[in-house]
Image (tube, rainbow, N blue to C red):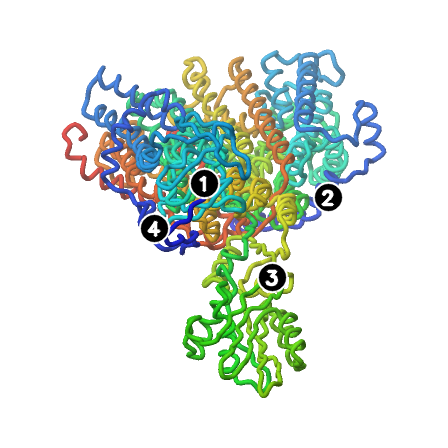
């Protein structure tokens, strides 16, 4: 079987698997986000936390819960990292430096999982499992909770209640993330991913060299790393490490896992608003962007190679694992940057300018195709609100989406949302480029060096967590700046999403008539895609021109 | 004391064909180039930053213009001055669009002010009581009138303030407000009692009770409205402004942060170029035209003789889901008309027509006249005047007999009656006749079809014996206005439901509703029913529009989202509604909805156009900025622009000129044809989205071809 055929089969199998899980997973999520019944174990959790599981919260209370949970998690994880030398299973690792501990805590709490450290040489097992892996579960659940609140804003009428954060959090973790991760951790183990409590083992290689290999509970972390679009690897090399991702099958499975919730959530949305066609329209936009991006990156990596070595290798093989090849690497790179996952199985820094530029652009889109767990859907729904607003005016009515009017209040929150992330990215990158000391952290010069910085801030502010590599970002300045970018990029948008949810929920819905702009037709799919590309394209075009475009155009 | 008039009694205003041109108003929406010149000083005055800041997008442009001016003074170059001049022109053009839109209102306000001359009011010093005589009058300036004062106005005098006629009847010339020269009748009591300050009494004497405070009269409000002084931003405008402001901030951030990137790349940019990039990217086209669009929307209503009390009402009109339309005057012509003669067996149709005509000669009601007309048109029976028939004694219609007719006492003696079926049949029986069985079904058939049956009976005396019989039945029916069905179909396509309001019984109402093609009807409607219907619709989240004129309509008008009061109506109704139709034409409600939609569409279309424009500007400016350090970026110069300076200048000049070019569109509104949301959207995306994408590529290239010969821009 040649590479092309294998590549096509992987893509087709992936699309097929995602299509198969769309309905059952989406419906199941909708069920757990709307069901009034609690499991017994959930009641125990609520009682322990002093939460009334039957009481819905107004949006400010929901937001306060999100923020309180974030702060506690941040402090806990920070403490964990600072004190790890005093804990069990530390493998003799030292305490993590304050700036790196802040950066790492912020990174895992915000579902970013940017790693300015090498897992195998920095973190002990307990920190990996009880600190980082726990955040992998809960930070993913927070995103789903927030999008559930937004959807409730559309479905509920004349109320200030948008759901209960603690219930959403508990249910998503207990009923979805834990069981699914468990099953797929086993599958990964069967596929060859390691799962043990070995410490560092020294081995002698065939060539007679000594090598230290760190074992650990990898598979269990690997499953949630992908499923929760976290992306923080057990090893520095992340999913290109053979213990994390040994073969094409586990690679394919990891891509499936990091996409599956994001692509199923539109179904949840359609189900909850009582019109599955709305979900199909949103998933169509996501799929369109994802497929185009896969095509562009794959084509670039296969054909835009200038070196003769590249031609011999059949494409841009630098930075890619031989066992995955170009197709599986490009597929992984696109999927990880279009979600907020950020796990990598190849090094985006070494991609062709077109392919690497596309991975930046993917994140700049706001990670909405399909995006992180929950955050992808609320991101695209906000853009849908903007699209509906402009299009709604063009049909001569006060714009309305799913029966809710988009007035000044709603547009204020939506506008603030689309403003926030670009501002963080550009201001962060601008500062980094303006400070001479930070410019020195770049390993490359010219447009490629600039791309590395742009990539770092894009990745942090969008909570992606993948790194372009080539930037020595483990400095006090970068740890702090990127940590702040992650926190602001995660929680400011959530403030606006929840405020929007509250504003929508308080409205009386407007009946649908022939004068209402339909939001389930191909017309709307095209419109939304166009709005996403134009709004994002216009915002980042100058920066992209000086990075990937300057590099790519000769 | 009322005096009688010798003049012809003037007609009450009748509903005019909305499509007929109104000679008293300027035609709607066209831009006279002269206006651009006359509004220029106003446009310059608006450069005051305190005024500009209300429009965030254009304020950024003005600040940019100041920066480039300073920069151009410090280090002068042809390029810097070209950009500076065109940035100032951009702000001036934006102000110009607003000034032109306002200017048109100002002209109208002038006309209105002239009517507000120093009127003297003849106030009744001790107030007014019904039937009181010999009350003491005092003369005071109209401006000193207070709420509740009563004033006397006689022929030739100007009514000093808004109020209701409490005594007398008069013909009033309201042309100052409506532009309609035919006088109207105003009388105490009923729904035609409201008079407006500034209008002129032509005949008779009336006593008016003032219902408005000084300075808040109808004319005052009208002046404020057309001048735009009272203009507040409407909800959709606010929402759009928020979006535009946030786009402006995004682009500001994008350009400000570009400088460190550029320095790193070794291509530090001048202030002039950075400002030019910001101005090119922020949505100046829609930002410049936004307020003009709003003013022009109100103005388009004024052109159609509708006064909206707020822009909010105009926008709400675009959102309306349900239209409540009064049957009479809106859906049907004012009155029922005879449509058919249905003779009973043994009677010729001509015989029936003749009898019907004779019995209707003295019937001055519109129904009666329509019978005469039908007989004449269909059966060539000449209308006979009352005096022409010898020995004829006409019996007028009374509410008691519910019949009218004629007694002919000539050679042959006979009596004819026409009227309500029961009344005429009793009359026939009283004269010894026996109505045949077939009359009943004919009568029921007409009632069932929504018509009104009038039965014609005859008693003839021959040889002393009376013979009474029924001749047949006249079918009176409501005549649905021409083209209404098509209009309702259009409304349905726009997603608007129409509800016919009528006092008729449900059977009749259903028949007319079906014929006219309305979606629903409310029969035997009382004001309470109307109110309940509005509330029910609103509870479902729908917006309701209605027209009304009577005082009993006032609560419903106030409740409706768009309440259009007829100018002929009471002041209570006018107070309650949020629009007043000076022509008192209820059909205009449909046009009002269209104008509301057109207003929103114009905003949306120009926003799309404005944002789509940015793509081409990037392709002009980015290569111009950075091709010197990264030659590869020259590939982005797909327009093949002459030089970096000419490219940036062309983008800025295009940006400024497009504003002027679109002023007429902003004032006129984009073309609106009622259709479904999907097809409207497709059409507008193709024109304004794709057009906005392509047009600037052509425009910038053309400008570049022209300005590349300017020596400093090579």
Q: Between tags 2 and 1, which lies in front?
A: 1
Q: Between tags 4 and 3, which lies in front?
A: 3
Q: Is residue B604 above or below residue A5?
A: above
**Separation of disc 3 and disc 2 at Cα?**
73 Å
Residue denoted by label 4: B22
Q: Is residue A305 above or below residue B44?
A: below
In which quarter of the view is residue A380 placed?
top right
Residue denoted by label 1: B206
Q: Are marks 4 and 3 on the same chain?
A: yes
Which element type, helix, strand or loop, lies under badge 2? helix
Which element type, helix, strand or loop, lies under badge 4? loop
State if disc 3 and disc 4 touch (CB < 8 Å). no
Residue A28 numbered tag: 2
Q: Are marks 2 and 4 on the same chain?
A: no
Which element type, helix, strand or loop, lies under badge 1? strand
Residue denoted by label 3: B399
State if disc 2 and disc 3 touch (CB < 8 Å). no
Decide if residue B578 is in sight here: no
Q: Between tags 4 and 1, which lies in front?
A: 1
What residue appears at the point 62 percent right and 85 percent down from the top-left corner? B465
| x and y percentages locating residue B624 in the rendered image | 28, 31
B659 vs A387, nearest the viewer: B659
Assign the C terminus of chain A to one quadrant of the image: top left
**Separation of disc 4 and disc 3 at Cα?**
40 Å
What residue appears at the point 70 percent right and 12 percent down from the top-left corner? A83
In which quarter of the view is residue A59 placed?
top right
């Amino acid at each position: 079987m040649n590479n092309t055929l294998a590549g096509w089969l992987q893509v087709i199998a992936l699309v097929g698997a995602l299509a198969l899980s769309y309905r059952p997973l989406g419906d199941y999520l909708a069920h757990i986000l709307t069901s009034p019944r609690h499991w017994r174990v959930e009641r125990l959790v609520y009682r322990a936390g002093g939460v009334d599981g039957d009481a819905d919260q107004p949006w400010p209370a929901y937001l306060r819960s999100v923020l309180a949970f974030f702060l506690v998690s941040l402090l806990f994880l920070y403490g964990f990292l600072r004190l790890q030398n005093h804990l069990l299973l530390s493998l003799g690792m030292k305490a993590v430096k304050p700036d790196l501990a802040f950066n790492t805590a912020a990174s895992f709490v915000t579902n970013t999982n940017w790693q300015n450290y090498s897992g195998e040489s920095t973190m002990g097992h307990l920190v990996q499992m009880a600190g980082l892996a726990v955040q992998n579960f809960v930070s993913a659940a927070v995103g789903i909770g927030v999008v559930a609140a937004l959807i409730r804003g559309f479905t509920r009428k004349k109320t200030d209640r948008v759901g209960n954060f603690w219930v959403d959090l508990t249910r998503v973790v207990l009923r979805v993330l834990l069981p699914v991760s468990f099953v797929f951790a086993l599958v990964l183990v069967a596929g060859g991913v390691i799962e043990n409590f070995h410490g560092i083992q020294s081995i002698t290689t065939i060539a007679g060299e000594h090598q230290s290999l760190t074992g650990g509970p990898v598979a269990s972390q690997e499953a949630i790393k992908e499923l929760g679009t976290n992306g923080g690897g057990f090893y520095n090399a992340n999913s290109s490490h053979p213990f994390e991702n040994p073969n094409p099958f586990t690679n394919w499975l990891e891509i499936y896992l990091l996409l599956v919730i994001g692509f199923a959530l539109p179904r949840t949305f359609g189900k909850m608003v009582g019109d599955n066609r709305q979900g199909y329209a949103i998933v169509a936009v996501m799929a369109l962007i994802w497929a185009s991006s896969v095509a562009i990156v794959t084509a670039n990596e296969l054909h835009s190679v200038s070196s003769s070595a590249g031609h011999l290798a059949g494409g841009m093989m630098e930075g890619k694992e031989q066992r995955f090849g170009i197709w599986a690497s490009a597929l992984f790179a696109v999927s990880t940057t279009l979600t907020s996952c950020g796990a990598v199985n190849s090094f985006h820094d070494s991609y062709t300018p077109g392919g690497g530029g596309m991975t930046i652009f993917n994140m700049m889109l706001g990670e909405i195709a399909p995006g992180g767990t929950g955050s992808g859907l609320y991101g695209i729904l906000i853009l849908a609100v903007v699209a509906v607003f402009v299009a709604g005016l063009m049909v001569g009515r006060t714009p309305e989406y799913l029966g809710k009017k988009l007035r000044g209040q709603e547009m204020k929150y939506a506008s603030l949302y689309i403003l926030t992330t670009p501002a963080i990215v550009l201001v962060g990158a601008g500062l980094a480029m303006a400070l001479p000391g930070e410019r020195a952290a770049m390993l490359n010069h010219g447009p490629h060096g600039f791309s590395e910085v742009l990539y770092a801030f894009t990745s942090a502010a969008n909570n992606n967590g993948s790194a372009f590599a080539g930037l020595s970002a483990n400095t006090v300045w970068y740890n702090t700046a990127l940590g702040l970018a992650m926190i602001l990029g995660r929680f400011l948008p959530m403030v606006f999403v929840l405020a929007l949810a509250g504003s929508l929920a308080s409205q009386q819905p407007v009946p649908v008539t022939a004068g209402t702009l339909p939001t389930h037709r191909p017309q709307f799919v095209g419109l939304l895609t166009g709005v996403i590309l134009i709004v994002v394209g216009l915002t980042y075009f100058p920066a992209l021109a000086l990075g990937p475009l300057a590099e790519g155009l000769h | 004391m009322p005096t009688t008039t010798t003049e012809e009694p003037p007609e009450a205003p009748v509903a005019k064909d909305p499509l007929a041109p109104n000679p008293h108003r300027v035609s709607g929406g066209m831009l006279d180039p002269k206006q651009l010149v006359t509004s220029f000083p106003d446009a310059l005055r608006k450069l005051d930053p305190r005024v500009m800041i209300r429009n965030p997008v254009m304020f950024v442009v003005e600040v940019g213009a100041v920066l480039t001016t300073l920069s151009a003074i410090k280090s002068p170059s042809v390029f810097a001055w070209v950009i500076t001049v065109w940035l100032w022109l951009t702000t001036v053009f934006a102000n110009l669009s607003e000034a032109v839109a306002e200017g048109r209102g100002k002209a109208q306000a002038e006309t209105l002010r002239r009517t507000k001359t120093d009127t003297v009011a003849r106030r009744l010093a001790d107030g007014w009581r019904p039937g009181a005589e010999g009350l003491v009058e005092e003369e005071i300036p109209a401006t000193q009138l207070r709420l509740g004062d009563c004033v006397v106005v006689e022929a030739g005098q100007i009514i000093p303030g808004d109020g209701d006629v409490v005594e007398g009847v008069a013909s009033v010339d309201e042309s100052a407000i409506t532009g309609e020269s035919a006088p109207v009748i105003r009388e105490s009591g009923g729904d035609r009692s409201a008079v407006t300050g500034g209008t002129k009494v032509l005949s008779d004497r009336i006593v008016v009770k003032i219902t408005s405070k000084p300075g808040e009269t109808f004319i005052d409000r009208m002046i404020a409205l057309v001048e735009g002084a009272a203009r507040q931003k409407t909800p959709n405008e606010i929402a759009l402004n928020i979006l535009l402001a946030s786009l402006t901030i995004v682009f500001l951030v994008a350009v400000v942060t570009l400088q460190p990137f550029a320095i790193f790349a070794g291509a530090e940019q001048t202030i002039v170029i950075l400002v030019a990039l910001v101005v090119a990217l922020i949505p100046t086209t829609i930002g410049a035209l936004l307020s003009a669009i709003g003013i022009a929307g109100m103005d388009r209503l004024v052109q159609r003789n509708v006064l909206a009390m707020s822009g909010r009402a105009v926008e709400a009109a675009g959102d309306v889901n349900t239209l409540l339309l009064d049957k009479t005057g809106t859906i049907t012509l004012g009155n029922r008309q005879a449509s058919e003669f249905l003779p009973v067996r043994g009677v010729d149709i001509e015989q029936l027509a003749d009898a019907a005509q004779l019995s209707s000669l003295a019937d001055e009601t519109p129904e009666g006249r329509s019978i005469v007309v039908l007989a004449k048109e269909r059966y060539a029976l000449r209308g006979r005047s009352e005096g022409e028939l010898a020995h004829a004694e006409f019996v007028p219609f009374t509410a008691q007999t519910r019949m009218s007719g004629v007694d002919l006492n000539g050679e042959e003696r006979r009596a004819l009656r026409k009227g309500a079926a029961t009344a005429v049949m009793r009359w026939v029986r009283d004269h010894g006749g026996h109505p045949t069985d077939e009359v009943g079904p004919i009568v029921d058939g007409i009632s069932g079809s929504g018509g009104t049956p009038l039965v014609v009976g005859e008693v003839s005396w021959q040889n002393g014996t009376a013979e009474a019989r029924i001749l047949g039945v006249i079918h009176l029916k409501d005549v649905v206005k021409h083209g209404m069905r098509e209009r309702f179909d259009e409304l349905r396509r726009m997603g608007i439901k129409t509800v016919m309001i009528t006092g008729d019984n449900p059977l009749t109402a259903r028949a007319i509703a079906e014929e006219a093609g309305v979606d629903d009807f409310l029969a035997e409607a009382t004001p309470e029913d109307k109110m309940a219907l509005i509330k029910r619709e609103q509870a479902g989240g729908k917006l309701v529009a209605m027209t009304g004129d009577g005082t009993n309509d006032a609560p419903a008008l106030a409740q409706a989202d768009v309440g259009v009061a007829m100018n002929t109506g009471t002041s209570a109704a006018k107070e309650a509604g949020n629009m007043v139709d000076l022509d008192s034409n209820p059909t205009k409600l449909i046009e009002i909805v269209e104008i509301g939609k057109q207003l929103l569409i114009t905003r949306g279309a120009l926003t799309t156009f404005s944002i789509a424009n940015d793509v081409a500007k990037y392709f002009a400016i980015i290569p111009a900025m950075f091709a010197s350090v990264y030659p590869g970026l020259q590939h982005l110069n797909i327009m093949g622009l002459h030089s970096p300076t000419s490219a940036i200048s062309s983008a800025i000049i295009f940006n400024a000129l497009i504003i002027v070019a679109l002023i007429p569109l902003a004032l006129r509104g984009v073309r609106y044809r009622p259709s479904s949301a999907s097809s409207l959207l497709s059409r507008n995306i193709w024109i304004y989205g794709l057009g906005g994408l392509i047009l600037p590529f052509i425009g910038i290239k053309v400008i570049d071809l022209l300005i590349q010969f300017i020596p400093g821009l090579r």
